Image (cartoon, helix red, strand yellow):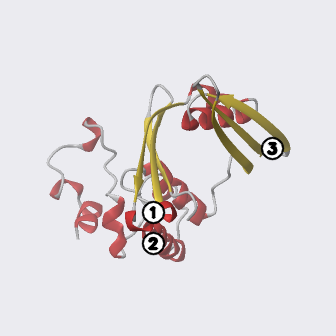
Amino acid sequence: MHVAGVEADARTFEHLDPAGSATSGDPAVGALRQGDDPRPGACRRESRFDDEGASRAIEMLKEREHRGYHYEAAPASFELLLRNEAGVYKPLFELESYRVVTQRRAGGEVETEATVKVQVDGERYVEIARHGPVSALDKALRQAITSSHPQMAAIELTNYKVRILDQDRGTDAVTRCCSDSTDGEREWGTTGCPGT
């Protein structure tokens, strides 16, 4: 009802103009689970979503949230899901593999190394970076794709959170990762559930 009301006349549900705040004015992703139109943002404005695509997006959203994804905190991931369902998503790279190795040396120092192998515009890149596990992966991936996509050099990972979703399964538990990034002007969130 809230989403439908905002779509009809946003003033009926918004006590402030979203343009004057940090919010986008798009409905929360969670509100779309009940079958409403999942067309906020660019996909709706560009009219690239038909009714069948909207239905597929709702089903994909439900299925992914059942597996552990959390799109309320990750509008950028939701936007990518919508673009994929609308048939307009073009990935910047294709992942071949990645590996993270953490080792403790005899002297007690701990070293982490990440190796990322990707295809960018038909060319294979292998990059290695060192630091903490998340930082090393982030750095290696950006090194691999920056030559073809120089705008990636300005992007910085600002925060990430990891949550175990089903603690009773021990090491087989589903893990949800949420990260925040910025390009110095905008900030956005993404989500992932490795292994699901």
Mark 3 secondary-structure assignment: loop
Whichever of labels 1 and 2 marks the residue nearer the N terminus, that label is 2
| Residue assigned mark 1 | 170
Q: With respect to residue 72, does 85 lie above or below?
A: below
Which amino acid, mark 2? Ile
Tag of residue 99? none
Which amino acid, mark 3? Asp
Question: Residue placed at 30% from the left, 65% from the top?
Answer: 31
Choose top left, top right, bottom left or bottom right for residue 138.
top right
Mark 3 or 1: in front is: 1
| Horizontal side of residue 109 vs 36, given as left or right | right
Which amino acid, mark 1? Gly
Q: With respect to residue 191, does 172 lie above or below?
A: below
Mark 1 secondary-structure assignment: helix
Residue 150 x/y as whole percent: 68, 28
Give the quadrant of the C terminus: bottom right
| Residue assigned mark 2 | 58
Tag of residue 121? 3
Classed neighbour count for the residue bearing mark 2: other residues with Cα under 10 Å, few (<14), some (14–19), many (≥20): many
Q: Distance between the residues labelled 1 and 2?
A: 31 Å
Choose top left, top right, bottom left or bottom right for residue 104.
top right
| Horizontal side of residue 147 vs 14, given as left or right | right
Question: Residue placed at 42% from the left, 50% from the top?
Answer: 74
Whichever of labels 2 and 3 marks the residue nearer the N terminus, that label is 2
